[in-house]
Amino acid sequence: ASPKKAKAAAKPKTPAAHPHYAEMVAAAVTSLKERGGSSRIAIFKYILKNFNVGAEEKKINAHLKLALKAGVAKGTLKQTKGTGASGSFKMGEVKAEKPKKAPKAAAKKPAVKKPAAKKTTVKKVSAKSTPKKK
């Protein structure tokens, strides 16, 4: 058994110098204003130009693809062409949340439980067992 190494104290994570990828994608699609939707490459170039995301293009591209797929799944983005993270993307239909009707929910009264009818069980009187004769 090898000696266990003591874990170094975890450093507090520094916040990124850019917003979440979902927000950056939304900003890119709205500002590019392409009629048929913005391509992944155009969105990628916009993010590189306008946000401080660093120079590692492979990592940025991976995060972008994940953000595009998640946006399509949630409905915030609409894919006009292609499948997966390729193709063109538009902003999804923004559904206005309807205010929930709280007074109606409060009006419901808890169901009054009726007392259960008492069950009359007849106990069987077992005949006294007589010891067996030998």
Image (cartoon, rainbow, N blue to C red):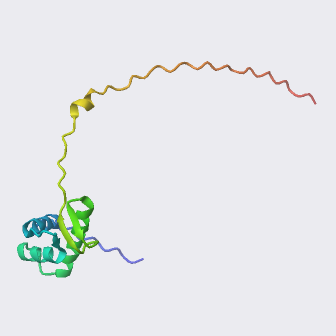
Q: Which residue is pictured at 61% across the width and 18% down the height?
A: 120
Up-down relation of residue 37 to residue 113 (above or below) = below
Q: Is residue 72 visible?
A: yes
Quadrant into which the C terminus falls: top right
Where residue 86 appears, as percent x and y from the top left, is 24, 75
Q: Which residue is pictured at 12% across the width and 81% down the height?
A: 55
Determine which quarter of the picture holds residue 128: top right
Determine which quarter of the picture holds residue 64: bottom left
Up-down relation of residue 29 to residue 122 (above or below) = below
Q: Is residue 15 visible?
A: no
Where residue 122 appears, as percent x and y from the top left, is 67, 19
Relative horizontal placement of residue 66, taking residue 134 as reference (left or right): left
Up-down relation of residue 119 to residue 78 (above or below) = above
Relative horizontal placement of residue 117, taking residue 43 as reference (left or right): right
Where residue 101 appears, as percent x and y from the top left, is 22, 35
Q: Which residue is pictured at 58% across the width and 20% down the height?
A: 119
Residue situated in front as seen by the camera: 67 or 2: 67
Where residue 110 appears, as percent x and y from the top left, is 35, 26
Residue situated in front as seen by the camera: 100 or 90: 90
- Callout count: 0
Quadrant into which the N terminus falls: bottom left
Determine which quarter of the picture holds residue 91: bottom left
Residue situated in front as seen by the camera: 81 or 110: 81
